[in-house]
Image: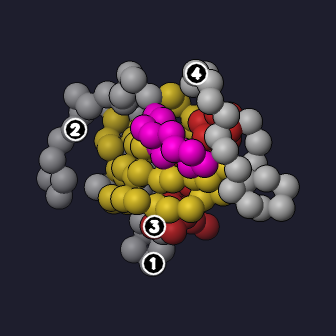
Amino acid sequence: MSEFPSTAALQPPSDEELVLKVIPMPADSNANGDIFGGWVMAQVDLAGSVIPARYAGGRIATVAVNEFIFKQPVRVGDILSFYSKLTRIGKTSITVKVEVYAERFQAQGQFVKVTEANLTYVAIDEQGKPRPVPRRPAP
């Protein structure tokens, strides 16, 4: 019996964009055989930057991890799908929500939400100073 409730009916969000897919490998695991949380965080940061970089039309930098929740362990061989959605546009910053779903190696086609996060990025110029985000409709 699994220590976690069944989530076989869970489907990834339809109102968010798939921005990254990755499979963690044994080198990414800790002594318990689960994937390091820091590795997951790095992937979330990469996935979270896709929409802000496109929207800002230039360089961006991560300025805040507003919320980060590990809901389920990530295992070697899981197929991770990272979905992102723009949630706020400020004068120089863009905030996104990232949700991570795993298709377990032995149960592909069944999704388990493993992580969710909210991150803020700031548009920066060539000197690394904040610059205004262009005012235009999101792509």
Q: Secondary structure at mark 2?
A: loop
Do callouts 4 and 3 mark residues in contact (Cβ within 8 Å)?
A: no
Q: Secondary structure at mark 1?
A: loop
Q: Which residue is tagged 3?
A: 37
Callout 1 amino acid: Ala
Q: Nearer the viewer, mark 3 or mark 2?
A: 3
Q: Which residue is tagged 4?
A: 137
Is residue 91 something one can see in this rendering?
A: yes
Q: Return the residue found at the far bottom.
A: 31
Q: Which residue is tagged 2?
A: 7
Do callouts 1 and 4 mark residues in contact (Cβ within 8 Å)?
A: no
* Dot label at residue 31: 1
Sort mark 3 into few (<14), some (14-19) or many (20+) by Cα contacts within 10 Å: some
Callout 4 amino acid: Pro
Q: Label 2 to label 4, Cα distance in Å?
A: 36 Å
Q: Quadrant of the C terminus?
A: top right
Residue plotted at (76% across, 42% down): 58
Callout 2 amino acid: Thr
* Dot label at residue 126: none
Sort mark 4 into few (<14), some (14-19) or many (20+) by Cα contacts within 10 Å: few
